[in-house]
Image (tube, rainbow, N blue to C red):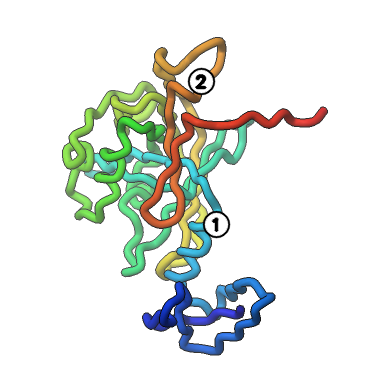
């Protein structure tokens, strides 16, 4: 199937949506999305449903005026160990508004990343609300700001692992809706709660981190299976 821009009409009795452009369907073919011809909200749904599970960067930052901000982003990973670089990618909102997190980090060049475990999942979700820049999401979500050691943005006290970071670079992919702003930060300090550190590693079953799936769904990491890498 070749998919272009979609209307809001679903084909009766199926999960298929009738596209505004040509829809070619063969019983032996798979869905094919051409980003140049597909509505970006639809393409976002396809991408975020396929690239799973995704860890969650719970990012604390400060505005130039010192107003705290806390927001989660699931387009997130490690970019380098030496030097230690982490990255996350806040996209421009569908209404064309750049995330407060990006503006804050460009202004102050510092932030913290906080790991999201099961016990703070609801709090994390509360901080995903679209609110004005002057709103403090720590207060909004009932969380405790903990002083950082080397940067000004606070850590989330209820989180079990934190990264204190300084800005390395922001790579912008445009100003249009859904354009990414890839934030790369150098890790200055990593804070690990004693309760999750065991035998020289972070014990997964104690950290109980959660990850993002497509739509409103999340996954737990407390259950896993082992696969030994070949020599």
Q: Is residue 26 above or below residue 108?
A: below
**Residue at x 48%, y 33% (from the top left corner):** 221
Which one is nearer the viewer's eye here, 42 or 40? 42
Which residue is most to the top?
A: 199
List x then y, in percent, for residue 180. 47, 59
Which residue is most to the right?
A: 231
List x then y, in percent, for residue 195. 40, 14
- Which label number is shown at residue 50? 1
Q: Secondary structure at mark 1?
A: helix
Residue 183 in view in this figure: no
- Which label number is shown at residue 202? 2
Label 2–label 1 contact, CB within 8 A: no
Q: Secondary structure at mark 2?
A: strand
Q: Quadrant of the C terminus?
A: top right
Callout 2 environment at 10 Å: few (<14), some (14 to 19), or many (20+)? Answer: some
**Residue at x 55%, y 17% (from the top left corner):** 201
**Residue at x 42%, y 58% (from the top left corner):** 91
Q: Is residue 156 above or below residue 168?
A: above
Using the numbered discs, state the Cα–Cα distance from disc 2 to disc 1 in whole angstroms. Answer: 28 Å
List x then y, in percent, for residue 170. 49, 50
Q: Quadrant of the N terminus?
A: bottom right
Position of residue 11 in the picture relative to residue 126 (left or right): right
Disc 2 versus disc 1: nearer the observer: 1
List x then y, in percent, for residue 83. 61, 32
Which one is nearer the viewer's eye here, 10 or 214? 10
Residue 32 in view in this figure: yes
């Amino acid at each position: 199937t070749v998919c272009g821009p979609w209307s809001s009409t679903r084909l009766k009795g199926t999960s298929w949506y009738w596209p505004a452009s040509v829809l070619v369907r063969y019983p032996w073919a798979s869905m094919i999305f051409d980003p140049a011809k597909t509505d970006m909200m639809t393409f976002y749904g396809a991408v975020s449903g396929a690239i799973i599970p995704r860890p969650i960067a719970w990012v604390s930052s400060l505005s130039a005026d010192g107003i705290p901000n806390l927001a989660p982003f699931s387009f997130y990973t490690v970019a380098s160990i030496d030097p230690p670089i982490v990255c996350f990618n806040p996209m421009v909102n569908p209404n064309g508004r750049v995330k407060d997190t990006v503006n804050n980090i460009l202004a102050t060049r510092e932030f913290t990343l906080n790991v999201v475990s099961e016990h703070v999942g609801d709090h994390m979700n509360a901080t995903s609300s679209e609110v004005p820049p002057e709103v403090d999401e720590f207060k909004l979500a009932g969380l405790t700001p903990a002083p950082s050691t080397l940067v000004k943005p606070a850590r989330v006290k209820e989180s079990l692992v934190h990264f204190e970071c300084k800005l390395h670079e922001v790579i912008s992919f445009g100003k249009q809706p859904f354009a990414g702003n890839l934030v790369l930060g150098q890790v200055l300090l990593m804070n690990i709660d004693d309760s999750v550190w065991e035998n020289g590693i972070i014990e997964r079953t104690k950290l109980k981190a959660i990850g993002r799936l497509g739509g409103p769904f999340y996954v737990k990491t407390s259950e896993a299976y082992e696969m030994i890498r070949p020599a």
